[in-house]
Image (cartoon, rainbow, N blue to C red):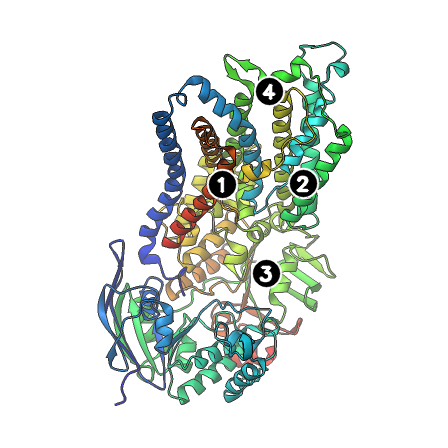
Amino acid sequence: MAQPLLEASGFRKSFNGVAALRLGQFTLMPGSVHALCGGNGAGKSTLLKILMGIHHRDAGRLLRNAAEVTFGNPSQALDNGISIIEQELSPVPAMTVAENIYLGREPVGLFGRIAFREMNSRAQDLLDGFHFGIRADTLMMDLTVAQTQLVEIAKALSYDAEVIIMDEPTSALGEAEADQLFAAIAMLKARGKGVIYVSHRLSEICGICDSYTVFRDGAFVETGALADIDKDRLIQLVVGRPLTEEFVKDNTPGDDTLLAVQGLAADRGVRDVSFSVRRGEILALYGLMGSGRTEIFDRLFGLSGQTAGQIMIDGAPVTITTPRHAIDAGLAYVTEDRKRSGLVLTGDVRDNLCLATLDRMGVGPVMNTRAEGRAAARMIDVLNIRTASDRLSVAHLSGGNQQKVVLGKWFLTEPRILLLDEPTRGVDVGAKREIYRVMSDFARAGGAVVMVSSETDEVLGMADRAVVMRDGRVAGELDRAAMSAEQLLHLAV
Amino acid sequence: MEQQTDTTGTDRRMGTASRMAPALQRYGILIALAVLCIVLSVVSENFLTSRNIINVLRQTSINGILAVGMTFVILTRGIDLSVGSVVALVGVVSASFATTSAAGVAGAPYMPLIPVAVGLLTGMAVGSVSGIAVARFSVPAFVATLGMLSAARGLTLIYAGGRPIPALTDGYRWIGTGDIGGIPVPIILFGLVFAIAHFVLTRTRFGRHVYAVGGNPHAAKVSGLPVRRIRFAVYAISGALAGVAGMILAARTGSALPQAGVAYELDALAAVVIGGTSLAGGIGRVSGTVIGALLIGVMNNGLDLLGVESYYQQVIKGALVVAAVMLDRSRKTED
C-alpha cells in the first residue's frame, strides 16, 4: 500500500472549554478524492483549519508523508504542499489570470521589473496542462465563477501542492459548470494528488469521490471506500439516525390559480415568460445558472425595473414596482444569497425576524419591544431555530438556522406566495429536511411556493410541477409524473 | 472556510462573547473616561470643581451635538464632512435675524423663535441637499459632503459679506450663555439632543431602519424598507443638529463668525469612532458617542489645566482616535 499524503490522528481542539473537535482522525492517500462529510458542528471545519495552520490543535499527531509536522500558520501549510480552495474565492478582479496565480511571487527581471512574458507563459503552460481553456492574460473579472475556481486550482498547483482541499466548491456553480470542475478533479487524481472534498451535496460526493470520512458532533464516525456504501447509508451516518426519506412532501395542489405571470420580461434578456402556480402547489423554476430564474424573482418582487408583462394574483392584475408592493400583495422572497440580501449580519436574531414587519409592531413611530419579542419567539418556536436567545447576533448561527431566520422574517408578513431561490444552499442535511417540511406545510395550508433550484434531486423531490428555463425563456413545463433528471436537463441545455 | 455553517457546537460560547463585546466596548471607554477623571482630579486640584465640570460639559456640548448627528449618518455607512461649514452657515443666517437692529429694540429679551426656526431650517436644508445627492443620485457620502463642506463655507462668506454679524440680542445670546437653574443652556440642549436621539435609535421604527440600512442595504431593500428615504433623512438630521450647534456657538461668541467651525467635523468623527460606532455601518450607539465626546472634552480640559500647549492636544487626540479603532479591531479578530 502506498504511503498516505496526510495522516491525522487523535486531534482535539477546544474553544474556551467547549470541545469543537473531540476525536479528529483522517487519512488521505495519493491519487484519491476523499469526501469529508458531516453536518453543521460536526467538527470538519475545525479539522480543516488545523490542517491549514489556522487553528492549533490541543492534542493529536499530524503526519505529512510519514513525517510529523505542525503548522503554525497557513503559509507553513502551503510550504508543505497543502492548499485550499475556499468556498468564497477572493481574486483580484482587475488583474490578469497570470498575475493572480503568481500574486506576491511574480518572476522579476532587471531592476525588479516584473517579467510579464515569463509569468504569462508559465501560467499558460499550467492552464494548458489541464486543458482549462483559459488564457493567462484574461482579466479575472471577465471569468465565470467556475473558471475562477479553475484558476485557483492552477494557483494551488503552481505551489506544487500535493494536497488540495476544496470547501463547497460547487455551491456557486450550475451543473454544466460543475462538470468542468469535476473533470479537473479527475485530472488532479490522475496526477497522484490528494483532494479533500467538502460538500453538503451527497449525490455529488457519491459521483466523484473514492473514499469518505464522516464526522458527527465533533468526533470521527467512520471512514471507508464509497464503493462499499450508498447515499442513504451516507445520509444516515451524517445525520446519526436513519432518514426514512430525504424530502418531506405532503401538500396537494388545489384548483384555483393564485399567481399567474404572462409575457413577463426581466433583466439579462429574460423575455416572454409565462407560468402560473395554484394554491397548495410547489412549482420549481429549473434551469442552469444564468438562465434567468433569479431575474424573474427580482422582477416579481419589484427589485428590477418595470418591464413588459402582466402579473395576476388571485385573478386580479397587480403592479409591483417596489418590494413594499410585493409584500403588500402577499409575496415573500427568500433570496439566493442570504448574506448579501437576506440577513442584516450586524443585527441579532430578533432584529432580523422583525425586519419586514416593523410597520405592524408599534404605535405610530414608536416600536413595541414586547410585540417584537413575542413575534421573534413565535418564529423561533415554529421554525425550530436553534439559538441561545433572540438577542444573539445572527452572524453566529449556522447556515441552516440563518436560512430559517430569513424564512421566519417572511412568515411574519403572512404571505400567500413564497418565492424561494436556492432555499437549501449551504445548509446541512438535517436542516434541509426541516426547510422542506416548512415548504410543504406552507403549501398544505393553502399557500403557493415557487422554488428556484439547481439541484435536480430537490426539484424531483419537492416540486409538483417544473417550469424549465433556458436562455431567459421558458423551454418547457413538466408535471410531477413526467419529471425526471434526464427530462429536466434535456430541456435546460 | 465554513465559519458560518459549522458552529452549532460553539454557538453558546460565541453567544456569550458577542453579548459581552458591546458591553466591554461601551464600558471600556467609560472606564477610560473614569480613569482619566480620577487621574486629573489627583494631579490638578482645579479639575474636580463644579465650575470646571460645568465648563467641560459646556465646551463639549457643541461637539457632542454634532457627533450625535454624525452617529446617525455613520450608522447608515455614510459620513458627513460638512458639519463644520454648516455650523458657520447656520450661525450667520440665524444671527442675521437676531441682531439688535433686526429685532428693532436694543437688547430685546424676547425668546428668539424666528432666528432659531430659520437656523434649524437652514441646517436641515443643507443636510437635505447632501442627502439627496447620496440617496437619490448615489454620490458617495464622502464626496457629496466634501462638496458641501466647501459650498456651505462659501455661502457663509457670501451671505455675511466676509464679516462677522455682531450685536446679537440678549434673547439670542441666552442660547449660548444663559442657564436654567444654574445649568447652562448648551448643556441642557446637549442633554435633550442625546435623550431624543437615544430614544429614536433604540425605540422607534426609524431607528430600526437606520440600523438595518447600515447593516445591509440590500437586505433592507428586499425587506421593503424605504432605503432612500432613510439615507436622506439621516443627512437632514445631521444638518439640523449642526444648525443647533451653530446657533449655540454664535450665541456664545456674541457675534456670528463666518470662519467659525473649521475642522469641527474631525472632532465629531473622533467622538463617534471613539464611542465604538463602526464606520462600516449598522453597529453603534449614541451613548457611546456622548462618552467619546466627553472623553475628548475632558482630555482637552485636563491638558489645559496641566498647561500643555494646545498643539500637543491635537497630536494626542489623533493618537486616541487611532488607538480606539485599533483596540476595536484587535477585539474583533480575537473573536
Kindly report the distance in space between the C-alpha atoms of the residues bearing marks 1 and 4: 29 Å
Kindly report the distance in space between the C-alpha atoms of the residues bearing marks 2 and 4: 24 Å
Reading the image, the residue beneath label 2 is B149
Above or below residue A452? Residue B185 is above
Name the amino acid, label 1.
Val
Q: Chain of mark 3?
A: A
Residue B74 in picture, x, y percent from top left: 55, 43
Check disc 4: other Cα within 10 Å, few if <14, some if 14-19, many if 20+.
Answer: many
Tell me whether the residue at label 4 lies in contact with that at label 3, contact meaning CB atoms closer than 8 angstroms: no
Name the amino acid, label 4.
Gly
Q: Chain of mark 2?
A: B
Reading the image, the residue beneath label 4 is B176
Left or right, B335 with respect to A289, comes to left
Above or below residue B54? Residue A343 is below
Tell me whether the residue at label 2 lies in contact with that at label 4, contact meaning CB atoms closer than 8 angstroms: no
Say whether residue A413 is visible.
Answer: no
Reading the image, the residue beneath label 1 is B315
Describe the element under mark 3 as helix, strand or loop: strand
Q: Nearer the viewer, mark 1 or mark 3?
A: 1
Q: Nearer the viewer, mark 1 or mark 2?
A: 1
Left or right, A310 with respect to B50, comes to right
Q: Nearer the viewer, mark 1 or mark 4?
A: 1
Check disc 1: other Cα within 10 Å, few if <14, some if 14-19, many if 20+.
Answer: few
Kindly report the distance in space between the C-alpha atoms of the residues bearing marks 2 and 3: 57 Å
Report the residue at 29% width, 69% height from top: A215
Q: Nearer the viewer, residue B74 or B211?
A: B74
Residue A405 in picture, x, y percent from top left: 45, 52
Q: Nearer the viewer, mark 2 or mark 3?
A: 2
Reading the image, the residue beneath label 3 is A278
Residues indicated by labels 2 and 4 sit on the same polypeptide chain = yes
Tell me whether the residue at label 1 lies in contact with that at label 3, contact meaning CB atoms closer than 8 angstroms: no
Check disc 2: other Cα within 10 Å, few if <14, some if 14-19, many if 20+.
Answer: many
